Image: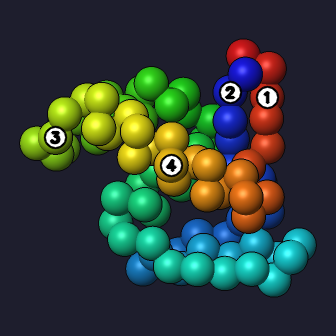
Amino acid sequence: MAVKLKKNIALSESGFVFDPSTGDSFSVNGTGIKILEYLKSGIAEADIVEYLCEHFDADKKLIREDLDDFINHLKQLKMIVHENA
């Protein structure tokens, strides 16, 4: 099952994230905003991991764990929708 950011989530280039359905907002860094843009576009998590591996000198397993943590946080905020893969 793939994950995708809800369509109504507003993202700014500066990293401000807003969910108009709940009023929740928070800020993320440049990496976070890129991940959110990818999720909103429906890009697969494995492809996001590959992007992050290309741009950061970090272990692929660590990047995957960090991405999973980030997505779990988004799930807690109810900003993620599930789609059948």
Q: Residues within 10 Å of mark 2 (few under 14, many from 20)?
A: some
Q: Earlier in the sequence, mark 1 or mark 3?
A: 3
Quarter of the figure with the C terminus: top right
Relative to 60, does residue 19 appear above or below in the rendering? below
Q: Earlier in the sequence, mark 3 or mark 2?
A: 2
CB atoms of marks 1 and 3 within 8 Å = no
> In percent of the image, x 35 and y 59: which residue is there?
31
CB atoms of marks 1 and 2 within 8 Å = yes
CB atoms of marks 4 and 2 within 8 Å = no
The residues tagged by marks 1 and 2 sit, at their Cα atoms, a distance apart of: 5 Å
CB atoms of marks 1 and 4 within 8 Å = no
Where is mark 1, residue-wise? 83
Quarter of the figure with the N terminus: top right
> In percent of the image, x 66 and y 81: which residue is there?
25
> In percent of the image, x 45 and y 62: which residue is there?
33
Q: Amino acid at mark 1?
A: Glu
Where is mark 2, residue-wise? 2
In this rendered view, identify the residue nearer to me: 76 or 19: 76
Residue lying at the far right of the rendered structure: 21
Q: Earlier in the sequence, mark 1 or mark 2?
A: 2
For this view, does 5 lie left or right of residue 35? right
Where is mark 3, residue-wise? 58
Q: Amino acid at mark 2?
A: Ala
Where is mark 4, residue-wise? 69
The residues tagged by marks 3 and 2 sit, at their Cα atoms, a distance apart of: 24 Å
The residues tagged by marks 3 and 4 sit, at their Cα atoms, a distance apart of: 16 Å
Q: Helix, strand, or loop for circle 3?
A: loop
Q: Helix, strand, or loop for circle 4?
A: helix
Q: Earlier in the sequence, mark 4 or mark 2?
A: 2
Q: Amino acid at mark 3?
A: Ala
The residues tagged by marks 4 and 2 sit, at their Cα atoms, a distance apart of: 15 Å
